[in-house]
Image: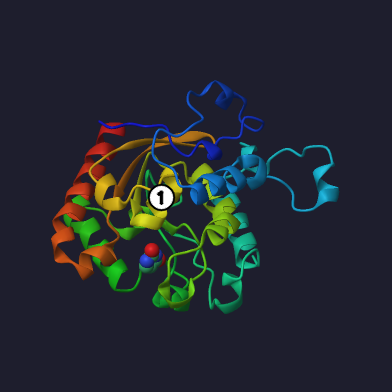
Amino acid sequence: MDIEQSLPGFVNPDVYPDSKSLPGLGNSGETSSVLQSQAEASLTADTLLAPDTPTERIAPPQPDPLLDESRDAVELLGEVLAEAKTCVRCSLAEARTNVVFGVGDPKADLMFIGEGPGADEDATGEPFVGRSGQLLTQLLKDEMSLTREQVYITNVVKCRPPGNRDPKPEEIQACDRFLVRQLQLIAPKVIVTLGNPATKTLLNTTTGITKLRGSKHEFKYPGGMATLIPTFHPSAALRNTANLPMLREDLVVARQELLSQS
Ligand code: URA
């Protein structure tokens, strides 16, 4: 199994003292300067969990409500959703119809992460409901005997990039606070990244999905750890059917991983 340390920025030693002893805050994969600096600038939890204004920055640190164990993760996720719905941290907010936060079981052991909503998702507020989503739903059933309701599905960015372009680094950076909180609260054991933008963001690498698929990665996030399995975006299988068997194969691996961890 090809296990590597990944997404060091999701670990905040101030909030998670134990994380100080976690090995390898670096990344064993190839990194781009853009994503590297994005990871340094945005995925450090200092930034992720930091207050927004200089005045607030000098205020004494407040307890993180997400670490209050007396509060239900589902309730907290609702609060994060409420925050996302009013988010104007990047220009994607201007043209959106709906914030597409995530769907499925908030206690799921398996999380799928795509790049960002398309037109159908923007219109409905639900991720992966268009052609790609229908294929994903079918593959979940075929290869994992699971329904959409039994897993959690989200994207790296929660608002639609115009014309279905890839999200820009600054948009990913503006939105990463929501993904980090989803990871913290849902605490998945297995993560499947769909396509290049999601895989490159989470693994902090420039290596493409064609090379990365078929591998497994140890992925740390605040408060937890998952096995990350990169695979093709369903749209890549719709565009080129030669990718479909590999996508199916990767979902079978994800199912095995899930079973081995339960
Ligand atoms: N593609 C994605 O990456 N996410 C969606 O939600 C839909 C299409």
* Residue at x 40%, y 33% (from the top left corner): 28
What's the coloring here? rainbow
In depth, the one of 249 and 85 nearer the eye is: 249
- Identify the residue under disc 1: 200
Q: Picture coordinates of residue 81 (x, y %)?
A: 58, 60
Residue 70 visible in rendering = no
* Residue at x 46%, y 47% (from the top left corner): 32
Compared with 47, 98 (above or below) is below
Q: Quadrant of residue 95?
A: bottom right
Work out which quarter of the rendered image holds the N terminus and state it. Answer: top left
Q: Picture coordinates of residue 113 (x, y %)?
A: 40, 54
Ligand 1 picture quarter: bottom left
Residue 260 visible in rendering = yes
Amino acid carrying label 1: it is: Lys
* Residue at x 39%, y 47% (from the top left corner): 108
On screen, residue 158 versus residue 227, left or right, reads: right
Compared with 37, 131 (above or below) is below
